[in-house]
Amino acid sequence: MMEDILKKILQMREGKSEFKKLEENIKNMDDIKFEYLINRLKTQIEIVNKYKPKVRPALDPVISFELGVYRRLDDYEIGKLLNYPLCCIKSFSEDFRIAIDREHLKEAKEINTYAIVITSGFIPCSLKCKMAMKNGLLGYMDEEEFKKY
């Protein structure tokens, strides 16, 4: 899940990524700070791989801050970096769906499940988005599975 994000960040550092706006932050970062961020991300990856949550957690806030996620430099680059489906990026950026809304709540009533889990900070275009599920950003849990957590 998160190894792909690490790979993309390393490519940005080398100037070999498709993320030209985000790449500048990474390329200009001093080596000590960059190594610190990479080690934080590797630790997060270890934890995720050990506990195997239903959906991947949000990116470590320190890493997100340094990448420019909170500055919203480019919604499409950030979304692609974080493996968000294009349909969800468009919904967020173009339709300005920045929170769970009435349409999501309507869908939630239609879904026959005990719990709907979403990566923190991610707003899917739909609670039924197959790509969000495939990318580990959205999932459903029955009561038994939910109680394990």
Image (cartoon, rainbow, N blue to C red):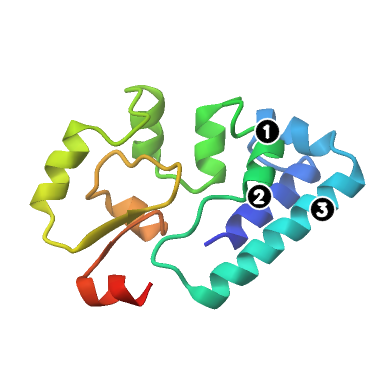
User: In which image quadrant can residue 22 be found?
Assistant: top right
Q: How many marks?
A: 3
User: In which image quadrant can residue 29 be found?
Assistant: top right
- The amino acid on which the numbered mark 2 sits, given as a three-letter code, is Lys
User: In which image quadrant can residue 39 be found?
Assistant: bottom right
Q: CB atoms at circles 2 and 3 under 8 Å apart?
A: no
Mark 1 or mark 2, which has the lower sequence index? 2
Q: Which mark is residue 22?
A: 1
User: Which residue is denoted by mark 2 in the rendering?
Assistant: 8
Mark 3 or mark 1, which has the lower sequence index? 1
Residue 13 position (above or below residue 56) = above
- The amino acid on which the numbered mark 1 sits, given as a three-letter code, is Leu
Residue 137 position (above or below residue 25) = below
Q: Which mark is residue 36?
A: 3
From the viewer's perspective, tell me whether residue 132 is left or right of residue 18. left
Query: Residue 61 at x, y = what percent?
Result: 62, 45
Give the residue displayed 36% in from the left and 39% down from the top. 123
> Between residues 90 and 101, which one lies in front from this camera angle?
101
> SS for tag 1?
helix
- How far apart are the two marked residues, 1 and 2, measured between alpha carbons? 11 Å
- How far apart are the two marked residues, 2 and 3, measured between alpha carbons? 16 Å
Q: CB atoms at circles 1 and 2 under 8 Å apart?
A: no
Q: Which mark is residue 41?
A: none
- Please tell me how crowded label 1 is: few (under 14), some (14-19), or many (20+) other residues with Cα within 10 Å: many
Give the residue displayed 64% in from the left and 71% down from the top. 46
Residue 110 position (above or below residue 78) = below
- Please tell me how crowded label 2 is: few (under 14), some (14-19), or many (20+) other residues with Cα within 10 Å: some
- The amino acid on which the numbered mark 3 sits, given as a three-letter code, is Tyr
- How far apart are the two marked residues, 3 and 1, measured between alpha carbons? 18 Å
> Between residues 19 and 112, which one lies in front from this camera angle?
112
